[in-house]
Amino acid sequence: MKNVSPSYLKHQFLIAMPHMHDENFAQTLTYIVEHNANGAMGLIINRPQSLSLADVLEQLRPELPPPARCKDIPIHLGGPVQTDRGFVLHPSGQVFQATVDLGGISLSTSQDVLFSIADGYGPDQNLITLGYAGWDAGQLDAEFAANAWLNCAFDPAILFEVESEDRLDAAAAKLGVNLNLLTSQAGHA
């Protein structure tokens, strides 16, 4: 009997299939930060909120007016879990109080990364989210078996160079898929 090791999706994109009815994930592109036998954690990267970095800075350091350019830095809805907790994806290199290198990209969760971005010495390429997506052990695997997701290789250009509203289609295009041509009906043969 062949020994098959689990296939985990860390450092990949998850593309929600058109028939995804869960409003938390319908029409989303999610970057998978971690996926192992205990579950998975990811950040939705194509749902900007009405909040900007300026709004967040007004709460974190009210004594300083936020730089005007911070009004143009969107805060994304990273997922339905802990929506008051911030996460920043940025290219590897700069390290902050709480930074994890994910292999070419880093995840920082401490306030100092936000301050460095605001003050002009932080990573120029960044994506800021509030909240994250989480899956219990086996849950994401079951959703894949139910055809809820496609996955594709991570591409930093999609994360940092493509506008939020175009990221889902850009990731699907990497697979040669046009999501508009897929049926919203799921089934198994």
Image (tube, helix red, strand yellow):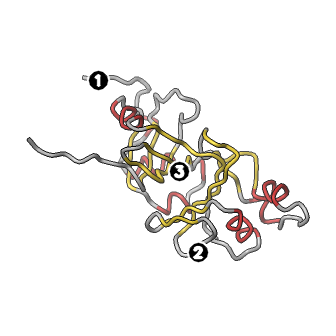
- Cα separation, mark 1 vs mark 2, equals 46 Å
Q: Give the labeled residue for mark 1.
A: 188
- The one nearer the camera, 165 or 48, is 48
Residue 94, numbered label: 2
Amino acid type indicated by mark 3: Arg
Left or right of residue 8, residue 28 in this image: right
Q: Quadrant of residue 108?
A: bottom right
**Where is residue 124 drawn, in percent x and y?**
64, 71
Q: Is residue 176 left or right of residue 23?
A: left
Residue position marked by numbered label 3 in the rendering? 167
Contact, mark 1 vs mark 3 (Cβ under 8 Å) = no
Q: Residue at x 51, y 45 (%)?
A: 29
Q: Amino acid at mark 2?
A: Gln
Say which quarter of the image contains residue 160.
bottom right
Q: Amino acid at mark 1?
A: His
Disc number placed over residue 169 in the picture, else none: none
Question: Which residue is at the far left?
Answer: 1
All told, the count of numbered labels is 3
Report, in whole angstroms, how far the alpha carbon at label 1 lies from the one at label 3: 28 Å
Which of label 1 and label 2 is nearer to you? 2
